Amino acid sequence: MSDAIILTDADFEETIAASAALVLLLTHGDGLRSDFSAAFKKAVDSTTDIAFARLNPSDNPKAAARFGVSDKPLLIGFLNGEEIVRRLRPWGSDVTLLVDELRAKSKPAAPAASASDAPAAVTAPDPAPASAAVPVDTKPVKVTDATFQTEVIDHPLPVLVDFWAEWCGPCRQIAPALEKLAAEFAGQVRIAKVNVDENPGVAQAFRIMSIPNLMMIKNRTIVFNQPGALPEPTLRDLITQLIALEVPAPEETDADKQPAQ
């Protein structure tokens, strides 16, 4: 079992600069969520391509000043010495998202083909029919029990689902931010809204116990699921991570491979 590296003011800059990919947890020793502690430990034990380190800002004022540490835990991801992403008071799901983002950004670009490698002639493919185009939503899309499968699970774009209700005050608080982000990320992400009072089937299927509840789905896979009203900057950051996150398409089952009758 591996352990996270313990850093100090004397060595944190050198370690960050020397690490290809590094996840740094700055904590005074309290305030960590239980789900985060479990996820961080699991990542330390199972991840071999990314280094993990801890630093106590109470004992290391130079690092505390460098990263602007408050009394809350802070999680930062570095790639080749450059800060890529940070999470204040992180959740367990942030560990996986941060690791995936570091891996995605560290992949080398495909080498450009030389002139000798180029084919003698290239025939342009026929344009795809208009019906195959991915719809561009500039506003959140209303989804029901009947349409959830096609509008969310089977949708070609990643989807952020907002489970809400008319009577929910926090739901109304985040609605303007979701409207804004739907327009900002149009064509990259779909934002869907499910009224749990009108659509109890979906809410029950995903065991939604508290609202608002935000769920992110990509390639038919749930990659994020968390209750609570998040501020606009956090929502924007999560959507950016969702776009960058690489999720393998699920393997087809025998039923999927059967031709339509």
Image: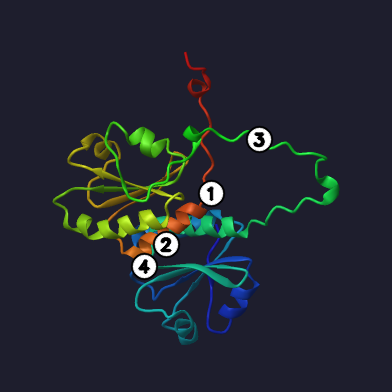
Label placed on residue 237 = 2
Query: What amino acid does circle 4 point to?
Result: Arg
Mark closest to the chain's N terminus, 4 or 3 = 4
Residue corresponding to mark 1: 246
Mark sitting on residue 125: 3
Q: Look at the numbered discs 4 and 2 and tell me whether their residues touch, using CB distance below 8 Å.
A: no
On the image, which quarter does residue 86 sit in? Answer: bottom left
Residue 40: x %, y % from top left: 45, 60
- Residue located farthest toward the left when viewing the structure as drawn: 167
Residue 92: x %, y % from top left: 40, 57
Q: Earlier in the sequence, mark 4 or mark 1?
A: 4
- For image coordinates 58% across by 72% down, the residue present is 82
The residue at which mark 4 appears reads as 89
Which element is circle 1 on? loop
- Asked if one can make out residue 229 in the rendered structure from this viewpoint, the answer is no
For marks 4 and 1, give the CA distance: 24 Å
Q: Position of residue 58 (x, y in %)?
A: 41, 82
Residue at 23% across, 51% down: 211
Q: Mark 2 or mark 1, which is nearer the start of the sequence?
A: 2
For residue 149, the mark is: none
Image quarter of residue 103: bottom right
What is the crowding at mark 2: few (fewer than 14 residues within 10 Å), some, or many (at least 20)? few
